[in-house]
Image (tube, grey):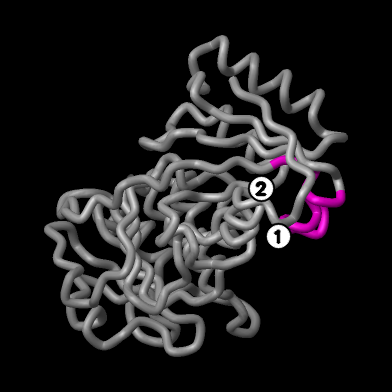
Amino acid sequence: MKIQTITSRDNVQVKAIKRLAQTSGSYKEAGQLWLEGEHLCDAFLKSPYKISVQLQKVVISLSAKPYWLALVEAFSLQGRVDESCEVIVLSDTLFEHISGLPSSGGVGFVLSLPEQINAIDKAAHTLVLDRVQDAGNVGSILRSAAAFGITQVLAVQGSALLWSPKVLRAAMGAHFSLNMVEGLRTHDVQLDVPMLVTHVHDGEFLHQLQITKQIPYPCAWVMGHEGQGVSEDLLNKAAKRVKISQVGQESLNVAAAAAVCLYASTVGH
């Protein structure tokens, strides 16, 4: 692996990495992703389910260099990191300049952007995000999807960008076990599996569907906008409208509702 030390903020690579780290949509133009922080980078290296991405650059601060350089070299010897991967070492101050985190641990990875699979798998166990806007919510939902057997995620226009730095951080490696298509319109969501749409007031109770084993598998769960819920177009396509029984006030946000629904769908299968 080639190791390069950079000391200037005006360096072209430093400027490019800073854009990736701090601008949500920059990955589309650059064709690259930025993973930052010890937990996320470690999750990427150790994930057995990585989709087709290449680790292109390891960016480390001077103080973090010994640990991360040794770790990446170990994974390189195992054949899990390509020899063409570059290592860029920055001073601690310069790393903080590019960082998108309050405390990063001094490490970030530049990855190639996976090629989006434009052909939707109509038979896949699917999660549909209908204009879910909060990056933290989207990341949390992706974690639940990866944990509970979802294989395909479809994001309708208006949802948070799936590969943005904030969503990547919140998902903590879930991206690497999911096939994801974003930027869809509602009429693009055409599936052969039954569509289950979450609704606050209308529909059948989730726990009753679980008890009577009426949750189809595979299916497509639709999670809607934090305030407006699921759009009429997708509501009209639903095989079932599902609501979650709540003993107290109606306080579940969309990420919590997704976790409850996907868990019920998995254990009921």
Q: Amino acid at mark 2?
A: Glu
- Residue 226: x percent and y percent? 50, 81
The residue drawn where x is 50% and y is 88% is 227
Q: Is residue 76 magenta?
A: no
112 lies above or below 213: above
12 lies above or below 50: below
85 lies above or below 108: above
Instruction: Name the secondary structure under disc 1.
Output: loop
The residue drawn where x is 57% and y is 75% is 253
Residue 100 circle label: 1
Q: Earlier in the sequence, mark 1 or mark 2?
A: 2
- Residue 115: x percent and y percent? 30, 47
Query: Among all residues in the image, which is located at the extreme top?
Result: 77
Residue 267 seen from this side: no
Residue bearing the label numbered 2: 36
Determine whether, in the image, residue 60 is placed left or right of residue 269: right
Q: Amino acid at mark 1?
A: Gly
Instruction: Name the secondary structure under disc 2.
Output: strand
User: Quick one: quadrant of the C terminus?
Assistant: top left
What segment carries the magenta color?
Answer: 93-107
Number of marks: 2
84 or 173: which is nearer to us? 84
Q: Are marks 1 and 2 in contact (CB under 8 Å)?
A: yes
